Amino acid sequence: QVQLVESGGGLVQPGGSLTLSCAASRSIFSFNAMGWYRQAPGKQRDMVATITSSGRANYVDSVKGRFTISRDSAKNTVYLRMNSLKPEDTAVYYCNAVKVSGRAENNYWGQGTQVTVSS
């Protein structure tokens, strides 16, 4: 069973920074991709940033230039560095891992970590 454990959320003022961590229970290279999603109250869960096993990163337009996804294979951990945070970044952030096996796509999720941007 795959476990993803997020950490690093909290309360930060507008313009501040946070780094989220997602520790996987097995090698991050065993997944086709990993990423971060977020869900604000009353809204759907949306992609924030993803990184493939080959290292290609993708970001939603609203965070480009402010957020950076990275990984540390030795620690089986994926990070999301968030700079210049805005109130609209407030949400529960979830770590995701995708494993494709043949025609099946398995998605794994962490429990989520709250990020609140407020003065």
Image (cartoon, grey):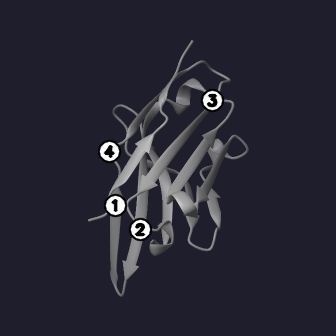
Q: Nearer the viewer, residue 99 or 103?
A: 99
Q: CA distance from mark 2 to mark 1?
A: 6 Å
- Disc 2 is placed on an element classified as strand
Three-letter amino acid code at the position of disc 1 = Tyr
Residue pointed to by mark 3: 85
Give the side of residue 56 with respect to residue 79, left or right. Answer: right
* In front: label 1 or label 3: 1
- Tell me where residue 76 appears, x and y as whole percent: 49, 60
The 10 Å Cα crowd at callout 3, few under 14, some 14 to 19, many 20 or more, is many
- Tell me where residue 52 appears, x and y as whole percent: 57, 69
Give the side of residue 54 with respect to residue 7, left or right. Answer: right
Q: Who's the residue at 54% across and 32% down the image?
A: 89
Three-letter amino acid code at the position of disc 2 = Val
The 10 Å Cα crowd at callout 2, few under 14, some 14 to 19, many 20 or more, is some
Which of the image's four quarters has the N terminus? bottom left
Residue pointed to by mark 1: 108
Contact check, label 4 and label 1, Cβ < 8 Å: no
The 10 Å Cα crowd at callout 1, few under 14, some 14 to 19, many 20 or more, is some
Residue pointed to by mark 2: 98
- Tell me where residue 6 appears, x and y as whole percent: 42, 44
Three-letter amino acid code at the position of disc 3 = Leu
The 10 Å Cα crowd at callout 4, few under 14, some 14 to 19, many 20 or more, is some
Of all residues shown, which one is farthest toward the right?
Answer: 65
Contact check, label 2 and label 1, Cβ < 8 Å: yes
Q: Which quadrant of the structure image shows residue 30?
A: bottom left
**First in sequence: mark 2 vs mark 1:** 2
Of all residues shown, which one is farthest toward the top?
Answer: 119
Residue pointed to by mark 4: 111
